[in-house]
Image (cartoon, rainbow, N blue to C red):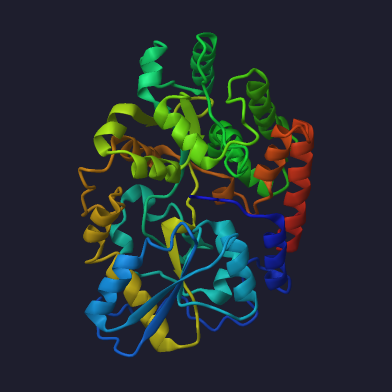
Amino acid sequence: MSRIRKPLIAAMAVALLTAACSDPGAGTADTGSAAPASWPAETEKLDGVTLTIWAAQNSNLVAKKVAADFGAATGAKVNILTVPDPYEQSVQTKVASGDKPDLAFWQPTASQLTAINAKQNLQPLDGAPFVEKYTPALKDATGILDKTRYAALVTVPAVEGVWYNKEVFAKYGITAPAKNFDAMVADARKIKAAGGVPFYEMGGEKWATQWWVQVQLADAAKNGLWDKVNKGEAKFTDPAILDAIKKYKSLIDEGLFNKNITSATFVDQGKALLTGEAAMAIQVNTFFSQLQAQSTTAELNKKIGFFPISPGGNVATFIPDQSNALIAFKTGDAKREAAARQFLSYWLGSAYPDFVKSQNTVSIQTGVETPATVPDALKANAESIGTSVGSMQVLAIVNPDLYLNLANMLAGQATPDKVASTTQAQFDQLAQAIGAPGF
């Protein structure tokens, strides 16, 4: 599953990596050039070369077939090592101790590239042969820090939005997806009044609580909210963000969610939507993966739909996670560094059409068709990226533990005001740790 979260302790550990640098993400001994010297041919022979890829528990099978095929074509050996959760914290700790793989799955946001100290630790991927193959909406959407590309996108970035059960909507006389957040709430009240469960939240696992706040901030994000937060000109305690937290709490208090909201799990949430126990869930792409594992494409097309949501309309919020992209490390071994670049070229080159088919997923390249077997809801999710806006994780310079603070609110341990003030204090602390101006 996609656990897009960044504990405060992990971020503070990274601060130790960057504390000596006035430029966040800059290293003390950056020996790399501005761009790789070359991009080897996809199947250039690599007999005797061994590459290591770090992956999380939910991404350790993504590259399995590509790695095997690359090995058969080049003679290289590719080992995929599963790094235990919490993945980001574990990777950052290992890298801080000097342990580096050749490649790793990584959240390709500017804040997470800063967290891994990209300028010191990662190979620039500018000039990669696959960059021009990306669909226009994705080409420069993520993976870039300070105008340098450090991450290679391999799948559609996660998008926050509303997954809904079409049959439940029909049961309660809802004929079309809502056109804005308030209209969605109106539909929810209609469902509740007739005895149904409008929304299902997985508060027991906490990490998705933040989606409810972030989709409410989509329009403000388009208008520069996170730029202001990054400069200290806006705060989580200001109405723009605080009111979104209060709205989330008020909808819970109104009884529009599942009664077991504080204990329900990710699996519970998927089951509830698929069976029709609940009408809607605000989630990201990997939520749909568990539905695919339990259903046929025909059943999903009949039952499940997706629509983006924001206060003013249907603006999606995108939040690429570590399963969507890979980074290549500077290891000091020129042959392995070149082989890592070659692996990315192969994956996003001749191997990509087969990868899309084997994963039954939406293509991110203009010249590769999305398989007909991909469910309609997943296609709709991917299509929403074209008009989407970045999440807090994408646009903020650091990411405080908003989801944990919201989970505390669900459990009755914090008020909305406390959530906002605690999150702002964490943001200030993290921003200071990376030397951000004004903090």
Relative height, residue 380 to residue 398 (above, below): above
Residue found 67% across the figure and 34% down from its top = 241
Residue 174 in sight: no
Residue found 33% across the figure and 50% down from its top = 136
Q: Is residue 270 left or right of residue 260?
A: left
Q: Is residue 327 left or right of residue 255?
A: left
Say how many tags the image has. Answer: 0
Please state the horizontal and vertical placement of residue 107, each as a whole percent of the image.
Answer: 51, 58
Residue found 62% across the figure and 40% down from its top = 204
Relative height, residue 193 to residue 306 (above, below): above
Image quarter in which the C terminus is found? bottom right
Please state the horizontal and vertical placement of residue 115, each as a whole percent of the image.
Answer: 61, 64
Residue found 27% across the figure and 38% down from its top = 296
Camera-nearest residue between 428 and 324: 324
The image quadrant of residue 128 is bottom left
Please state the horizontal and vertical placement of residue 175, each as a whole percent of the image.
Answer: 36, 14
Q: Is residue 159 left or right of residue 292?
A: right
Residue furthest to the bottom: 48
Camera-nearest residue between 345 and 249: 249
Residue 153 in sight: yes
Please state the horizontal and vertical placement of residue 390, each as a whole percent of the image.
Answer: 51, 45
The image quadrant of residue 25 is bottom right
